Amino acid sequence: MKTSQKIYLPFKRLIGLFGSIVGIIVCFIFLWWWIIPVNAIVTRGHPFFVQERYGKNQKVFKMIKFRSMKLSANPNLAPSDMDKETQKSMDTKFGVFLRKTSIDETPQLLNIFIGQMAFIGPRPGSAHNEEFLRECRLKYTPNAYDVKPGISGYAQIKMKREHDPEFKAEWDHRYVERMSFWFDVGIFGYTFLKILGAVKGR
């Protein structure tokens, strides 16, 4: 890792800490106070989905999201790995709304506050069903496990809706090589515009 990147990392953590505090307050005021009870009703008392993911240095942590699928859905099978009919049968209508607006990811502000994640970084792979992705990432130096995972990342904006582990590992490697304040700002800005619908993905 470059010297400039090592200097940036503590600063990045401060951004994550203060940014997550502001984000948690804003989300609670405008979103969470009504989303939590509504999703609890829709999912029969289980508004959150917690899954073990690989973080920095391959340390396993529990990532939190709003549940968007029925309780009968396989917890280790990502929606992207299901065919359209299966996913449609497993989705809750409210969950579709949460995923489409990316609101389902907002509880990860708590992971950022704790220090397990950052706003920008490689997306954390599942510790249960993405072993091939982990193997692909470890082929590179530097790799995704040299930094904290993020809510959004370079691979997400470059690959759009593709899910090839080998390509993802390569884009994650390129991110760690180029990681800097302005690079993170660019990824954050692109992600924000995409959520608003100003940028269309494939």
Image (spheres, rainbow, N blue to C red):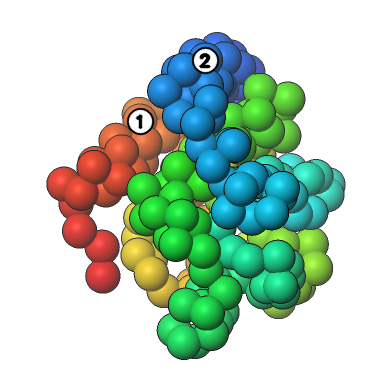
Residue at x 50% of width, y 31% of height: 34
Residue at x 52% of width, y 69% of height: 91
In the figure, 187 relative to 29: above or below?
below
From the top left corner, tell me how far across and down residue 65 is, in percent: 62, 46
Q: Which mark is residue 25?
A: 2
Name the residue carrying label 1: 185
**As rendered, which of 20 and 6 lies closer to the eye?**
20
- The answer, for residue 99, to whether it is visible in the render is no
From the top left corner, tell me how far across and down residue 33 is, in percent: 53, 26
Quadrant of the rendered structure where residue 8 is?
A: top right
State the SS at label 1: helix
**As rendered, which of 64 and 190 lies closer to the eye?**
64
Looking at numbered disc 2 in the image, what kind of residue is underneath it?
Answer: Ile
| Marker count (numbered) | 2
For disc 2, the neighbor class at 10 Å (few under 14, some 14 to 19, many from 20) is few
Please tell me which of labels 2 and 1 falls first in the chain: 2
State the SS at label 2: helix
Mark 2 or 1: the one toward you: 2
From the top left corner, tell me how far across and down residue 70 is, in percent: 63, 66
Residue at the far right: name it.
59
**As rendered, which of 182 and 17 lies closer to the eye?**
17
Residues at discs 2 and 1 in contact (Cβ within 8 Å): no
Residue at x 70% of width, y 65% of height: 71
- The answer, for residue 114, to whether it is visible in the render is yes
Q: Judge from the rendering whether residue 135 lies leftward or rightward of residue 121; answer left or right.
A: right
Task: Specify the quadrant that holds the N terminus.
Answer: top right
> How far separated are the C-alphas under marks 2 and 1?
22 Å
Task: Specify the quadrant that holds the C terminus.
Answer: bottom left
